[in-house]
Image (spheres, coloured by chain):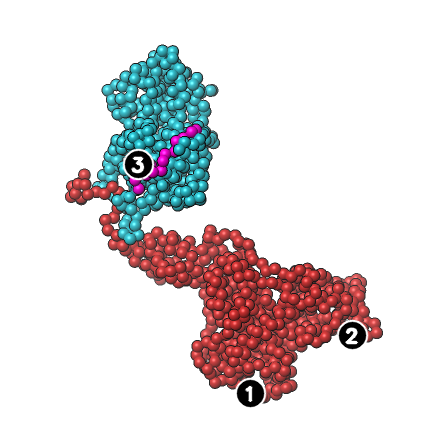
Amino acid sequence: MEKVILSSHAVAYAVKLCRAQVITAFPITPQTAIIEKLAEFCATGELRARFIKVESEHSGMAALIGASSAGSRTFTATSSQGLALMHEVLHWAAGARLPIVMVNGNRALGPPWNLGPEHTDSLSQRDTGWLQFYCESGQEAIDTVIQAYRVAEEVLLPVIVALDGYYLTHTTEPIDIPEEAVVDEYLPPYHPKHKLDVADPKAFGGFAGPELYMEFRYKMFQAMEEAQRVAAKADLDFRRLFGRGYGLVDPYRLEDAELALVAAGTLASTAREVVDARRGLGEKVGLLRIRLFRPFPRAEVRQALARVSKVAVIDRAISFGHEGIVSQELKAALYGGEHRPLIYGFVAGLGGRDVTPEDLEEALDRAGKEGPEEEVLWLGIRL
Amino acid sequence: MVKGLFSPGMLPLISISSRTTLDTPTGSWRYMRPLYQDRTPPCQDGCPAGEKVQGYLDLAKKRKFNEAWRLIVEDNPLPAVMGRVCYHPCESACNRKDYDEAINIHAVERFLGDSALAQGLELEPASGGERGEHIAVVGSGPAGLSAAYQLARRGYPVTVFEALASPGGVLRAGIPPYRLPRPILDREIGRLQALGVEFRTGIRVGVDLRWEELQRYQAIFLAVGLSRTRPFPVEGARLKGFYSGLEFLRDFNQGHKVRVGARVAVIGGGNVAIDVARTARRLGAEEVSLISLEPKGELPAHPEELEQARREGIRLLDGRGVRRIQGRNSWVEALEVARVDFQGRDPVTGAVAFTFRKGKGMLIPVETVIAAIGQEADLSFLPQEIRGGGWLLPVDDHGRLRDTNIFAGGDVVTGPARAVDAIGAGKRAALAIHSYLQGVLLEEAKLPPVVPYERLNLAYFIPAKRAESRSLPIRERLAGFTEVESGLSQGMVRLEAERCMSCGVCNGCDNCWLFCPDLAISRKARERGAYVINYDYCKGCGICVEECPRTAMALEEEVQWRR
C-alpha cells in the first residue's frame, strides 16, 4: 500500500510489520516522531509490544539488552547525544550477541549546540560491534529496517539503521508499505538458542579470562565478516519478494567513469544530479553510495572503483586529528586492493549545513587538479 | 585456541553458564543481612487508643471493611462515634501531611463504624472464657465504656454505674448532636450491652448507692470525668440569663427546654465553649461572641472547630477577659470586656493567669452569657483517704490507687483531655485490672520505633488529593441539629485508604522482590508477610532495603565483627 508519509513514520511501520515485542523510548530530536508513532501503534493495539518509557538512552538500551536476552524482538530509536550516552551498553549488546535493531536520526554533537544532520554520531560508534546501514530515502528506510532484523537475527549482532536528521526524518514522500503477510514470510519469528528463562536459570555474560576472551571476540569478527554475505542475501531475497533492493554499495554511472564521487545518506541524491549534469557536459564522472558501513564491504567497494583514477569522498563527518571517517575507511579498503586511485577527502555539511550542487561542482573541480592541495579538504568553509 | 580447555567448536557464542545459577550459592559473600522488620506507623503512635490505623486502612483498601472494623474494635469499641468526635491526633502525626495532605483517617473510621452498624455486626468476646470476678465501672463516658468493653470481652461480668438517665457521659451530655447524632451513640452503646455489659443508669454513687456497697466488686474503675462547673469568679454570675456551659449542654442534650437570647456571649476558648456557641446559634441566637483570654492561635479549641464556628458566623473576641456582667432587673443586660495579657494555663487544674490591660473596656449588650471556662472533678462521693487532697485522683503508673482494688482513668486522672485519651485510658485500665485480678505481671506494650517522614522512599509515591467529606450548607445547619459532616462514600474511602503510605509496615508492594538482582526473594502471593529471603543466594547488597518505600526492611550486620 502506498502512502505519503514521513520517513520517521515509515520506520515505525517497519517496526510494526516486524512485530517488535519490546520498544524502549527516550525522546530526542530528530528521531522523536518515530517513537511517538510507535507509542500510538501500541496504544491503539495495532502493535502488541511492551512500550517502555525510560529515564535515559543508556537505560533504554540496557532494557533492550534484558528484553533481547529473554528472546524478544526489540527496537529503539535515538540520535546524537543520546547515542553517545548509550556507548557503554552498545558494546555490551554486541558482545552479548543480541540482534537489537536501532534507528539513529543522524545529528551533530554539541557544543556548539546544534540539531542539524551529520554522521559523526553514528560513525564514531564504528568499533562497538554493531552493523550500520545509511539510508538515502524513506522507502529505503522502511525496507532497511525490515532487512536489518533479518540480518541481525541470522548473524546475532545488533544493527543501527541511520537516517539523516530532517533531510530524511522530517520529510514526506510516497512510500510503499510492504504487505504484512509478505514481511512475515521474509522475516520468521525470532527464537534464539540461548535465552533468559526462569525455568532454566543460567548466568549470562559471565567472566572469561584471557584464555577464552579472545575466542569470543574472534567469533564476533567472524560474524561481522559473515554479515556481508548475509546482508547481500537478505537484500536479494527482499528484491525477490518486494521488487526492490539496494545492494551493500550503490554504484551510479560508474561503468566508464574516471572520477567517482563517494557519499553516504541523502547527500547521494544531490550527487546524482551533479553527476548527470557533468555527464551532459561529456565528463566521465560517477557516484558510489556507501549503504553498509559496518561491516565495510571492501570487495564491493574495490570492484565498484576498479576503473576510476580519482575518487572525491564527501564526508559528512570528521575524525579530529585525521580526516573524514568514510574517506579513511575507503583509503584503508583500497590500499589492500590492486587498484589504488587518487583520493580527495572532502569534509562538508557539518552541523546540517546544506551541501548544494554548487558545492559538489566545486569538489569535482578541485578533484580535477593534479593531486589534492591538502590531506583534508574542507568544502564551503568561511573564515 | 588453547588446547585442552574445550574441544573445538564447543565454545558457545556468548559466555553462558552451562548449568543453573543455583549451583553458585552467592550467599557466602554476604556480610550484611536484609530482613523484614515492621516499624510503628506514626498514626498508631499518635493515637492514644493505639488504633492500628495502617492495618485497617490496608484492609479498607482491599474492600475488607468488616475485617477492618474488627481491627479497630480491638482498641476502641466506638468507631462510628469516635470517627465523628475524635480530634484525630493520628492525622496530625500522619507522614503523608509532609508529602501532600494527611490521610483522612477519621472519615475512614467513621465509614467503617457506620458500615458495621448498618450490617448489625456485633462485638465478640476475646478467647479465654468467662471469669468470675465482677467489676464495677463508675461513669459511662468514653473511659468507662472503653474499660467496660475491654473487661467484658475478656470474660468479666461488668456493671457500669451512670448518674444520668442514659449512658454515654460526655458523649451524650456534652457533645451536641450536629457532631454526633444520638442514634449512632445509642447503637454503639447497645452493642456493649449485647456483649454483656450491664448498665445501671440514674444511679449517682454516694447518693443513690453508698460507696461501701461497691466494695462487693472485686475491682472498681473510677471514670467519673469532670462533672462540676468551675465557679465563674466575676460580678453578675448570679443574674438570670447566665449559665455554665456544662449545664447548658447537659440540659439541652437531655431534652430540657433551653432558651437563649438573640445576643449571646460565650466565655471560654476551648472545645466546650465552641460546642456551646454553635449550639446557641442553632437555638436561634443571631449574634454569638466567643470571648477567650488566649490570643488567636493559642486557643485550646481544635482549629477545625474554630473554623466551623467562624463559618457559622460566630465572632471571636480573643485576648479579652470579662470584667463584669451588667444586669438590669436581675437579668443579664451587657458584658464588660477588656483586653488582657494572657500568661498561661495550668494543664491539669485549668487555672489561668492573666492581667487586664489598662484602659477602658468595651460594653457588649447581650441577653445570655454562657461561661465555658472549664470543669473540675467532683470527688465528694469518695472517702477522704481514697480521694486524697488534690484536684484529681492520685494513681500509680498503672492507674491504680495505692494498695487498693480501685483503679481510675480518664479526665478524673489527667484533667481535661480528649475523648480518645479516655478511650486509651479505659483500655489500659482494663489491662491493669486484668493483670491485678489474675496476679500476673502487667506487660508493657513496647512498640518498635516510629518511622519518620525522612525514612520513606518518596520515589514510590504519587501526589493525590485528600478526600474530604462534604459539610452541610450554613443555612441548613442553623435550621436545626442535623449532622454537619456527611462522611465519605465507599469509593472515596477506598481511594483515601490507597493514599496510605503504610509507613514501617510491609504491605506487599513487591518492590524488594522486583529489585533483588539475585532473585533471592520469593513471594507466595501478593499478601503481607509472604516474602521469603533465600540467604543461600542473597549477597547482602541491600537494594531491597533501599528500595523499600516504607522502611519495613532492615539491614543488619551478618556477624558482629568487632567486640
Q: Does the segment drawn in magenta span residue B172?
A: no
Which of A284/B519 is in front?
A: A284
Per the rendering, the colour in which chain A appears is cyan
Q: Is residue B561 visible?
A: no
Q: Residue furthest top?
A: A282
Quadrant in which the C terminus of chain B appears: bottom left
For the point 33% across and 28% down, the residue is: A244
* Same chain? Circles 1 and 3: no
Q: Label 2 vs label 1: CA separation?
A: 43 Å
Q: Nearer the viewer, residue B56 or A45?
A: A45
Q: Are marks 2 and 1 on the same chain?
A: yes
- Chain B shade in the render: red
- Image x and y of residue B449, in percent: 46, 63
Which chain hosts label 3? A
Q: Amino acid at mark 2?
A: Lys
The residue segment tinted magenta is A173-189
Amino acid carrying label 1: it is Gln
Task: Give residue A335's position: percent from left, percent from top.
Answer: 27, 22
Which residue is the site of mark 1? B215
Above or below: residue A30 compared with residue B374: above
Q: Amino acid at mark 3?
A: Tyr
Q: Quadrant of residue A375?
A: top left
